[in-house]
């Protein structure tokens, strides 16, 4: 009756892409089989002093090999623990979690900012349409080779060290790009600007949100965001990011 | 081997229950847990009308535990009755509805709405540290505890569990007050009020500033309070607070709990409740315990 | 960069002190810590006469912390004055003597014996959960807190720190009572009462049944209480409870503590106090804090 | 001014002697240099949920190699953690701690029971006298080869599967042994019987005691045992096992 459980994944490979940004492939048959772009997994720590799982987006799925790829930044003790693990070691996961991106056959912007870039890779692979991938970095870039294989890539950097100096919208404007649908993941200020841009241009816009989580599966009500309308499940103007999200129509949510 | 326990005339097939607020109404966890294997499902607190709860961040991890300040977000009793009770009725487990309110009237409204519902017991939360009105205010003064217990008992059609706060000088005083008010069962402990500060940004981590602490870090305090309460009252106790394993559950039972609730552990392992129920059976086999009731309060001194 | 803080006219070179009972009188730890680098050494509680303390086992490890029921074993004030004060006088650090007693008279006897001693401050322990008489009994009732504070202040020649128990419904009530009694400084928190049961042998792990819980598991509760108390009183606060790292110490300072005491962490790393003092300096450098006093109580809301 | 600190030791080798009994060699220069028989080290766990050190007796010291040997039984979570560690991994130690055995040139019994046997090995190596080593096991034996090199070994097993059926005193009687000094380490009932035997025969007797510890260095007063006379340090009839002990004259302590 209980069809899901924690899955023990084996680390196939891990490397540091940039200082503090790690790239890990995990063998985890069941999750790889079910997962799709925009979903995430809960990753559990070994150290007993850390009892909550860490939500990490799925960056790439290898269905054949039963493997998933996670690209993450060391943000604290938990991700630091993961970063020290080596090939052959185990990690416990629950997933895939969340709704994932809807996939439409429309000319698309895939916009990723910082550590919001990784889920754009799997999305790009799954989307069957014209893809313009716009990436915002602080300075150094990562995942560029992988993304370039999936579509035309445009870059914005805060310091202007590559691509457009400024943010992802500056890059869109500078390159005179347009699209019929937007998929985005990244920091809140970026998402706010994109939401506004999409509203102005009347483009369909999907964004992936983040919040502190506890259960990761919709039971504890830790991870809500404010919604424009009363949510059917919560019966108030709150949506669970881990369950109804993390991907929402931009106009559905308030942030 | 008998694993079943009796709480005010309600027979649970085993002593393992879910702690309110950590398990929703069972729907989401039913993918990870066969609810038929639990003694009871205790639902998230429900009020007379929908509550939006607190701003986010609502949770923070702390050493060996977590803080939460969800603020009792809930869909209100109407949707709860329409959706959540029918869902739980599909399973062979007991249904315990956790009730919250801002005023006595709020609590009574929920209790009355549940009177004709297929619900086995009511758990009255007078110990939530995360809401401005109601909640813990009812739970830190013995007179208030007795009064609300009496008021609820006068309306309730199901046995009443009073859920006590650990944020008190003397837990036995509150326990006796609830017993005097007619409580059938006691639940303890709710969360301990804690705080976390982000030293990089020099701000409170939780939007609510304080939050309720739960998880293994609070287990020894919970065991102590269950033990003290078991010495002080005659009604059965549901023990909770940091139960992560079958061993922790047995410790709570030895301290005097008739049943246990598992909360934060669900976040560390979504199938944990089932594993704890199995682990208790294993322990009973290894220690040749024919009836779990032999273990309740069976702790003794070393010599 | 200024790291020194002022407690009732006593200037500590930095805010890092040792928590009473975890550091002896400094002798044993002086092999691991340069005592000259600490703001103050707070000694193990000392009574008017030698106390033998409780039976063993006196300690138990719990998840993220420990329980202790040492029961205030101490050599009595005479040997303490003869041996421990002269030892500490060799160092350039402040000496704070923690005082315990079974009756008010016991406390006063120790306070009077220390009047002409080279001791910088007195810390009055009215919050030990591990002794039958005295201790916590003085610390859970605001009237008793005020009375003992007044009595001690009438005799004390040094500034008086009252050490409060977290095992209360409202810490600010006790804090205000101590302030009303004339306390110069407050220390909080002492340990939270906990219990551990050995499920194999079905017996209490500690000979005393209950013990005081300390260590990182209690840190969020301590931070909350320090924060609440800082809002309620004007006198300075020494914050303690689960400080393991410089980050934890800074969290406590942001919550409102002027100085911090490090206890259980000494058992996890005997050189930790020195490392915490260094870590605080590093933090101040990174965050361009010219004076540590800018950090005291500097926590704010996110928005 | 602070001359001591936690020392990071490297595991040179670890093997399982018997189910649940592990034998670990650690490189730890300073401790190896200072240590002597009967002393112990505090071993720290990696997992953050376990904050107290585990006291483990020193079984053997290799001064040349700067290494010590620990032989321990998996008794709970901490020792289980140690047992899973492999060559090259690190453990943090404080030590050497405690007083150690006094070494006299008298015909000696070295008596070890169960997991109290390991410290007898280093003691036997350091003692310069006639050594009769009496060992009590439940059933299976360990450290026999090492100990046989150091003196004549007599064994008692509870089930009679080897040597004398019974306890160490039965073995002494069955073999008609005598001595002028006793050194012993093992479970309390064994130590009680030895204390009585030594009193009766008026033999000098040293025993190594055990108690739950927190600091391990004499500061917290967790680990006391009752003493016959008022102890000089504590000023009451209590002695600190980690500081005045773990080795005491049998008649000095009450247990
Ligand atoms: C749906 C979702 C997908 C994510 N995908 C990625 C990803 O692909 N790559 C990546 O690098 N990061 C991702 N994050 C952020 C990632 O979860 C955090 O960086 C991580 O949890 C930090 O853990 P820590 O122990 O290192 O930090 P700590 O600060 O020590 O963590 C303490 C607690 O806070 C939580 N926490 C801290 N930061 C965040 C955060 N930003 N969001 C949610 N919880 C947080 C932790 O989970 C933990 O419970 C995602 C977050 C969400 C919600
Ligand atoms: C001076 C001394 C020397 C020792 N030498 C050895 C040795 O050489 N080999 C060996 O196998 N064991 C030895 N022990 C016992 C060893 O310390 C415990 O078995 C070990 O601490 C258990 O830790 P754990 O985490 O596995 O067990 P847990 O039961 O999970 O430990 C919980 C807590 O209790 C403490 N504890 C548990 N059992 C004991 C015990 N018997 N004595 C003291 N503290 C205990 C632990 O240190 C820890 O703080 C010695 C004990 C002492 C006091
Ligand atoms: C996220 C969260 C939400 C909670 N919500 C409720 C609630 O609605 N009603 C209630 O009585 N207790 C609530 N609690 C308290 C738990 O039911 C339980 O008493 C407490 O967490 C201690 O148990 P634990 O350590 O096993 O989690 C909540 C706890 C958590 C962690
Ligand atoms: C072993 C032990 C002994 C203690 N003895 C005393 C004492 O004698 N007097 C006192 O006021 N507090 C005593 N305490 C309490 C500590 O000073 C401190 O308040 C408490 O442990 C919380 O801090 P921590 O978590 O950093 O240890 C003792 C604590 C421990 C662990
Ligand atoms: S994290 Fe629990 S509901 Fe989303
Ligand atoms: S363990 Fe602290 S005095 Fe011995």
Image (cartoon, coloured by chain):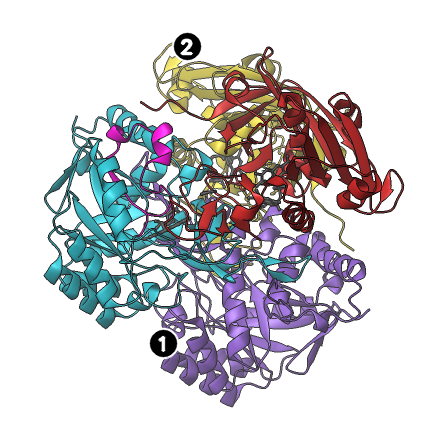
Chain colours: A red, B cyan, C purple, D yellow
Q: Quick one: quadrant of the C terminus of chain C?
A: bottom right
Secondary structure mainly formed by the magenta segment: loop
Q: Percent from the top left, x then y, of residue B225?
A: 31, 55
Q: Chain of mark 2?
A: D
Q: Chain of mark 1?
A: C
Local secondary structure at mark 1: loop
Q: Percent from the top left, x then y, of residue A17?
A: 77, 29
Furthest residue in direction right, as rendered: A161
Q: How many marks?
A: 2
Question: Is residue B36 inside the magenta stretch?
Answer: yes
As measured in the structure, the alpha-carbon distance from the residue carrying label 1 to the one carrying label 2 is 64 Å
Q: Which residue is mark 1?
A: C141
* Residue D32 in sight in this render: no
Which of A32/D57 is in front?
A32
Q: For mark 1, does the 10 Å Cα neighbourhood hold few (<14), some (14 to 19), or many (20 or more) residues?
A: some
Q: For mark 2, does the 10 Å Cα neighbourhood hold few (<14), some (14 to 19), or many (20 or more) residues?
A: some
Please check whether the numbered discs 1 and 2 fall on a single chain: no
Which of D59/B6 is in front?
B6
Above or below, B175 relative to B39: below
Q: Percent from the top left, x then y, of residue C9?
A: 67, 83
Residues rendered magenta in the picture: B20-45
Q: Which residue is mark 2?
A: D162
Q: Percent from the top left, x then y, of residue A153?
A: 79, 30
């Amino acid at each position: 009756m209980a069809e899901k459980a924690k899955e023990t994944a084996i680390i196939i490979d891990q490397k540091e892409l940039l200082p503090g940004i790690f790239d890990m492939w995990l063998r985890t048959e069941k999750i790889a089989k079910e997962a799709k772009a925009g979903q995430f997994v809960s990753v559990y720590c070994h150290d007993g002093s850390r009892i909550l799982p860490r939500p990490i987006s799925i960056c790439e799925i290898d269905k054949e090999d039963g493997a998933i790829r996670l690209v993450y930044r060391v943000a604290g003790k938990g991700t630091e623990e993961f970063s020290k693990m080596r090939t052959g070691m185990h990690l416990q996961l629950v997933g895939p979690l969340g709704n994932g991106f809807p996939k439409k056959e429309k000319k698309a912007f895939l916009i990723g900012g910082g550590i919001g870039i990784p889920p754009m890779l799997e999305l790009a692979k799954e989307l069957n349409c014209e893809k313009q991938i716009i990436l915002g970095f602080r300075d150094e870039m990562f995942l560029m080779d992988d993304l370039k294989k999936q579509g035309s890539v445009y870059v914005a950097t805060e310091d202007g060290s590559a691509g457009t100096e400024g943010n992802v919208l500056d890059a869109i404007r500078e390159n005179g790009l347009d699209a019929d649908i937007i998929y985005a993941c990244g920091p809140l200020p970026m998402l706010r600007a994109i939401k506004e841009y999409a509203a102005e241009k009347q483009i369909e816009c999907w964004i992936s949100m983040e919040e502190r989580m506890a259960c990761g599966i919709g039971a504890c009500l830790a991870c809500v965001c404010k919604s424009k309308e009363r949510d059917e499940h919560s019966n108030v103007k709150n949506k669970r990011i881990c369950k109804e999200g993390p991907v929402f129509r931009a106009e559905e949510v308030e942030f | 081997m008998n694993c079943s326990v009796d709480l005010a005339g309600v027979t649970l097939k085993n002593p393992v229950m879910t702690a309110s607020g950590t398990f929703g109404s069972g729907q989401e966890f039913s993918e990870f847990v066969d609810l038929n294997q639990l003694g009871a499902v205790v639902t998230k607190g429900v009020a007379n009308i929908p509550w939006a709860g607190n701003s986010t961040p609502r949770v923070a991890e702390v050493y060996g535990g977590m803080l939460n300040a969800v603020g009792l977000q809930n869909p209100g009793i109407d949707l709860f009755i329409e959706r959540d009770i029918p869902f739980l009725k599909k399973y062979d487990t007991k249904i315990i509805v956790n009730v919250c309110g801002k005023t006595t009237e709020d609590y009574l409204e929920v209790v009355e709405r549940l009177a004709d519902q297929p619900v086995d017991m009511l758990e009255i939360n007078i110990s939530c540290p995360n809401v401005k009105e109601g909640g813990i205010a009812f739970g830190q003064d013995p007179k208030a505890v007795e009064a609300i217990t009496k008021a609820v008992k006068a309306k309730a059609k199901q046995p009443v569990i009073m859920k006590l706060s650990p944020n008190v000088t003397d837990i036995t005083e509150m326990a006796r007050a609830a017993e005097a008010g007619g409580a059938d069962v006691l639940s303890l402990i709710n969360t301990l009020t804690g705080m976390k500060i982000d030293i990089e940004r020099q701000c409170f981590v939780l939007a609510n500033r304080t939050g309720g602490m739960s998880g293994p870090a609070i287990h020894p305090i919970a065991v102590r309070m269950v033990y003290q309460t078991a010495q002080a009252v005659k009604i059965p106790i549901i023990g909770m607070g940091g139960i992560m394993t079958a061993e922790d559950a047995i410790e709570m039972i030895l301290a005097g709990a008739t049943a246990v609730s598992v909360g934060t552990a669900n976040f560390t392992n979504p199938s944990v409740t089932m594993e704890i129920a199995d682990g208790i059976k294993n322990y009973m086999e290894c220690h040749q315990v024919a009836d779990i009731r032999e273990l309740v309060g069976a702790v003794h001194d070393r010599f």
